[in-house]
């Protein structure tokens, strides 16, 4: 991306591939403009995205076209309580989170360590309870199937469709909606008022799948905090302070910052629905409708020409308003197609973090080492993270 910018200035650059035109966005302001212009003239239901996702979420808002998109979007926003720090089910969710994290804490206290696999097992149990209720806690089939279908979607041009797996997945999903446990997302979905084609339950595969990204972000946030003592001190303050109504702003900003550093959606794709006008600093030009647009988020989030903090862990940018000065910082996208799960994700992940930090002193024991004095690496594999944990010094002697 740096090389492209050096050569083409503000861009964008149009790549002409056989059968497809792809426009690569190079300029920070263009990121804001493209995301603000959803769904017309920059439509989120991009051709490549549709191919990859239609197999497991044919009715998901992300790949919906035409007027139905807006109605599906409304269901997503309503059920996920987009725009409010605390989901309407927060009191019930807090109980589920406390119970599930307590189980994890018991386990890892015995071993003195948390690894990624153990953490993700607990994470999925928690997510299945929030989505479908206690009966789904150990239903690994429903999440494993979805992840396999997602993988098959990625390789759809090579692999045969998994018809049986897909049928089983959807059957189970709709079964949870038939007789939903109260205080779950599926109960909210089941009672959503929507016309026939909207398919509220059909929005849930995207949610389930996207909770995987939230688990990744959580683990990476833990790795950042475990290696940044100043930020850890503030995160612990945020965790232990009796906090009503549970809006843990610092922890939320830590999670946002981990997704800035390591975006879980590294490329945001759009297709143009009309002729669009651009300028590359030298001349103006027009791109015909039907082109694909690529926003490669890490290239913007880590742009050290524009961001003084590009490779550092600085949660404060999300609290003091400085992130707002940079339209190119879009960990949850932006504009009319911004992630409607954002607030629920920040609530859930910050609540889990608060429990862990309130209980343990945590040290990152895996490689690579992350250090406040060094630029953070461009990628961080969450699957290999490992933490050494001991009962927090301030709690020692208080256990019964
Ligand atoms: C760390 C966790 C997450 C991150 C970083 C994230 C980020 C994003 C991003 C960048 C997009 C835009 C994608 C695009 O335009 O191609 C998106 C869309 C979306 N996300 Fe999330 N997401 C997360 C978790 C979730 C969760 C847990 C849910 C639901 C519970 C969710 C629901 C959605 C939906 C429904 C869309 C489509 C919105 C639309 O097209 O109008 N996300 N998310």
Image (cartoon, grey):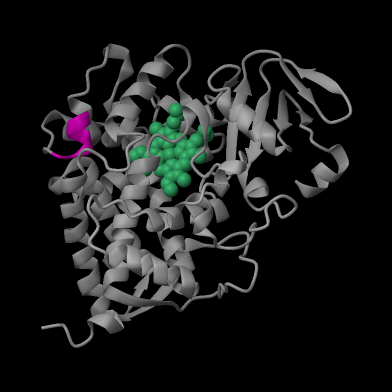
Q: Quadrant of residue 217?
A: bottom left
Q: Residue at image x 30%, y 64%? A: 239
Whole-percent x, y for residue 202 in the image: 31, 27
Q: Quadrant of residue 59?
A: top left
Assign the C terminus to one quadrant of the image: bottom left
Whole-percent x, y for residue 228 in the image: 50, 72
In the rendered structure, the answer to whether residue 11 lies left or right of residue 211 reads: right
Q: Residue at image x 24%, y 34%? A: 173
Q: Quadrant of residue 378?
A: bottom right
One can see residue 212 in this view: yes
Magenta-colored segment: predominant secondary structure: helix
Foreground: 12 or 248? 248
On screen, residue 27 above or below 144: above
Give yes or no for residue 185 being in the magenta stretch: yes
On screen, residue 289 above or below 399: above
In the rendered structure, the answer to whether residue 279 lies left or right of residue 38 reads: right
| Quadrant field for ligand 1 | top left
Stretch in magenta = 183-188
Whole-percent x, y for residue 298 in the image: 63, 49
Give yes or no for residue 81 being in the magenta stretch: no
One can see residue 152 in this view: no
Whole-percent x, y for residue 330 in the image: 55, 41
In the rendered structure, the answer to whether residue 360 lies left or right of residue 36 reads: left
On screen, residue 234 above or below 129: below
Foreground: 269 or 249? 249
Q: Residue at image x 50%, y 51%? A: 320
């Amino acid at each position: 991306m740096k090389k492209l910018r050096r050569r083409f200035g503000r861009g964008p650059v149009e790549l002409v591939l056989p059968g497809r035109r792809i426009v690569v966005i190079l300029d920070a302001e263009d990121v804001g403009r493209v995301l603000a212009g959803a769904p017309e003239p920059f439509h989120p239901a991009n051709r490549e995205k549709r191919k990859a996702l239609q197999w497991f979420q044919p009715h998901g808002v992300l790949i919906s076209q035409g007027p139905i998109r807006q109605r599906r979007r409304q269901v997503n926003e309503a059920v996920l309580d987009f725009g409010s720090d605390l989901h309407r089910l927060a009191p019930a969710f807090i109980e589920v989170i406390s119970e599930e994290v307590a189980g994890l804490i018991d386990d890892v206290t015995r071993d003195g360590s948390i690894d990624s696999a153990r953490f993700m097992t607990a994470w999925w149990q928690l997510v299945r309870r929030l989505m479908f209720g206690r009966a789904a806690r150990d239903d690994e089939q429903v999440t494993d199937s979805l992840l396999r279908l997602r993988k098959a979607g990625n390789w759809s041009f090579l692999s045969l469709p998994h018809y049986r797996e897909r049928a089983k997945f959807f059957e189970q999903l709709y079964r949870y909606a038939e007789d939903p446990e109260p205080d779950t997302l599926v109960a909210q979905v089941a009672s959503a008022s929507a016309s026939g084609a909207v398919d509220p339950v059909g929005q849930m595969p995207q949610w389930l799948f996207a909770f995987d990204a939230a688990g990744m972000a959580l683990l990476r946030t833990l790795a950042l905090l475990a290696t940044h003592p100043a930020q850890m001190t503030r995160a612990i303050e945020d965790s232990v302070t009796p906090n009503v109504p549970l809006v843990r702003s610092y922890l939320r900003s830590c999670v946002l910052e981990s997704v800035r550093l390591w975006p879980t959606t590294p490329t945001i794709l759009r297709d143009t629905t009309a002729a669009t006008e651009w300028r590359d600093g030298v001349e103006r030009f027009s791109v015909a409708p039907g082109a694909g647009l690529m926003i490669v988020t890490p290239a913007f989030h880590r742009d050290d020409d524009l961001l003084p903090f590009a490779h550092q862990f600085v949660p404060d940018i999300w609290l003091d308003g400085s992130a707002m000065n940079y339209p190119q910082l879009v960990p949850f996208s932006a504009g009319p197609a911004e992630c409607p799960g954002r607030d629920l994700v920040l609530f859930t992940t910050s609540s889990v973090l608060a429990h862990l930090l309130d209980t343990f002193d945590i040290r990152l024991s895996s490689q690579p080492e992350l250090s406040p004095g060094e630029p953070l690496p461009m990628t961080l594999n969450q699957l290999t993270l490992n933490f050494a944990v001991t009962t927090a010094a301030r709690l020692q002697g208080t256990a019964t």
